[in-house]
Amino acid sequence: MRVERKVIAIIMILSMWCSFASCDDEFVEDQNPTEEVDTNEDVNNGDDSTGDNTSEEGNTEEGNSSDDTSKDGNRTTIENKVFNETLIIDGHENDSLLIKNCTFENIDDIALVIKTVDELIIRDCIFRNLNSHAIFLQAGQNSNNITIEGNEIYDVAGIGIFAGEGHTNTKCINNKIHDVAFVDVEGHTPHGIYLCGKNFLIEDNTIFNCGSLDGKGLGISVRSYGTISKNKIYNGRASGIAFSSDHPAFNGTLLIENNVIFDNYENAITLYLSNEDSPLGNITVRFNTMLSDNKPVVYANSWKSLSSELVSYGNILIRTDGDDTYIDSSSSNPFSEMQNLYSSKDIGFIDFDARNFHLKSNAEALNFATGINDFPEFDKENNRRNSSGLDAGAYEYK
């Protein structure tokens, strides 16, 4: 009996030692102490409490599609928690982790740091009252297929969603991001969404009141290729959407379609294409509704002769300051334009002054793009487009 008790005691000590040995003490540089959640604990309990500062290997299910909500039940989940310190997710033992219905608030540093982990989902969370970035996919680390969906991000001094170039196939879907990007944080110009990795999807987000009073800050800023679709971006202190060629772009395609962009301080879309070492293969801007009141609606800065193909068609471009330059690109690399509708005024919107850009039955945009063969199958609100009566802009008339 004594021998049995000794064996049990030894097993308990070894178990405790292994648990502490597995703690991940890695921190983001220059940050305060962080929260590191133990993904082995019962995190589906609905507690409104922060996790303790321990971390063990989680028993996550791998191979689930990160955008398939029907499989959420198979995922290790962090749910209904409040975080007042930085949370770090690192290591492939956390692959397929779901962070859901959590609140990150009143934090002096980055709220949520993602390092080397795949298939992670961040869904229906709130990020607010932050003195740095909200969600940071850390530069120098690598991830694949991270989905950031249905979150609200506001009152954030830094960037709303920020991903370094090692993070591929990142998806930002249906997030509401506003009143963000007040200041530079550690040299990073503030943006609403800022992605550097390849093959991203930025879709159906609403971004407004983005940027600082000195004019810095973009609604969506990217450095590589992917798709920017169905977003609504307005009242920003700089451009609505921007690309800069200062990270590897892998000669890929940047597709910008079905977006509604208006009342931003700079251009609706700005493209900086001057770096010959990091070119895109082509940029297609199609079926967007865009308004500018003081600058060209689309601007492409490409004073070097690049091989990138710039194509623009099926858009509605409104410029209200009286200037008739709607697309400004260099003569060495001009846009190829086809069936864009240009105007200085209301062309038949439901309520132009209220910025309701749905089309009336007599709108000039009706059937304006008919004859274009390559177009998005659905409009911004998922109404199917018809090739025999194709309307310009982000919305089909219904």
Image: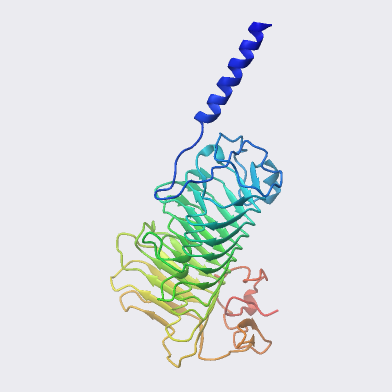
Q: Quadrant of residue 369?
A: bottom right
Whole-percent x, y for residue 103 in the image: 62, 55
Q: Residue at x 56, y 46 (%)?
A: 119
Q: Is residue 270 left or right of residue 153?
A: left
- Residue most toward the left? 304
Q: Residue furthest bottom?
A: 322
Tell me which corner region of the image, top left, top right, bottom left or bottom right, holds residue 1. Answer: top right
Tally of numbered discs: 0
Q: Position of residue 124 (x, y in %)?
A: 64, 57
- Give residue 47's position: percent from left, percent from top: 69, 47
> Seen in the image, is 363 located left or right of residue 274?
right
Decide which of 45, 391 is in the foreground and name it.
45
> Based on the displayed image, in which of its 4 quarters is residue 271 positioned?
bottom left
Q: Give the farthest residue toward the front.
A: 2
Coloring applied to the structure: rainbow
Name the residue nearer the viewer: 351 or 189: 189
Where residue 76 appears, as percent x and y from the top left, is 64, 41
Quadrant in which the C terminus appears: bottom right
